[in-house]
Amino acid sequence: MQQHLELDPSRRNKSTEQNQIAKTSKLDDAQSLPLTEAQPPGFTPTLPSYPQTYLLSLISSHDAPSLSSFLLNTLPQLQPQTQAIYSSFDALRSQVSAPALLLLAATHAEASEIFKMLWSALYAPHNPVQTGSPTDASSSSTPNRPDSVALQIPYSCLHHAALKGDISLARAFISCSPTALSRSPPPSLRGSNDGKSQILTALRHGHLDYLDFILSRDVELEHEWPRGRLVRAAVRMEWDDQEMEKRVRWLVGKGARVRGTGALRCVVKDLEGSVRVAEVLLENGADVEGFDENGEQEVDSLLMEAVGVGNGEMVKLLMK
């Protein structure tokens, strides 16, 4: 029966792990763990239980010296096919490969320095020097790498840092890939990003200090417009009125768009819609007529919507 890769190696039997580590001369015989997600064309490796389990244990225990020693001294001595799993361009550009899972483990361990160590050892040698020059990409000598294709931090790492509001990880991401914090989430199989935008994720969990940090690093608040309408998304989140007003005010204070988002209609159509939030939206240019909650043309007036749901206070506000 095949074993499955665990991000928490502490659950592994310690003596078994030590035996695996000792068998460096028999890496080809080590049990392998198959990847189940789609890979780039022509790339179908498996994840070796060694050294992957050993590396994950070093990351979870924040053992940076041992990890550094392995990357610098041991990895270059492993069998070529094992090295390729950690160093080939096709492996590194996959979001579910062995090195990608190491980066994700470092992110979950809140180990920003280890994250940078992994990136520097495994990814950076394949990336063009990012100085802004259009000739940088073509200057790379990495074999089998298409010109101008740069490796990216797995989006799962970016999302987790936003989820936790971890500014130290955000700093590490920028040092590894300067444009990482402005990345949009990849579409899901349903064709949407499932609300996993870095900005929306941090906003949903109240990490305004994290948002202040990434905005200070030249990330545009509305860089996902029109696919992502921040104010509309904010008023659809499950907060109490006071918290919703706080976050909506924060957004408009940072320059988020209100007009054309359909945010006001979202508030009005809710029987328990906050009148205070509606006032904030109206003060900042919300459309009284014309757009539904998806930003599309709408026939029914907002006043009729408020009457229809029976929100008397909202009716009074809209009749002013």
Image (cartoon, helix red, strand yellow):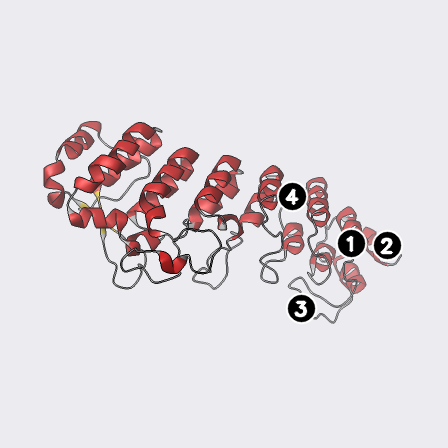
Residue 263 position, x and y percent, is 70, 57
Up/down of 262 relative to 313, above or below: below
- Work out how far the residue at label 2 is from the one at label 3, CA to CA, in angstroms: 25 Å
* Residue denoted by label 4: 239
How far is mark 1 from mark 4, CA to CA? 21 Å
- Of badges 2 and 3, nearer the viewer stands 3
Q: How crowded is mark 4: few (under 14 residues within 10 Å), some or many (20 or more)?
A: few
Tell whether 26 sits left or right of 305.
left
- Residue type marked 4: Trp
Q: Can residue 206 be seen in this view?
A: no
Amino acid type indicated by mark 3: Glu
Q: Earlier in the sequence, mark 4 or mark 2?
A: 4
Residue 243 occupies quadrant: top right
Closer to the chain start, of discs 1 and 4, is 4
Residue bearing the label numbered 1: 284
Mark 3 vs 1, N-terminal side: 1
Closer to the camera in the image, 277 or 271 = 277
SS assignment at label 4: loop
Q: Observer-nearest residue: 282 or 147?
A: 147
Q: Which residue is at a point 13% across and 36% down the rendered structure image?
A: 24
Q: What element carries label 3?
A: loop
Which three-letter amino acid code belongs to the residue tagged 1? Asn
* Residue that carries the numbered disc 2 in the rendered image: 316
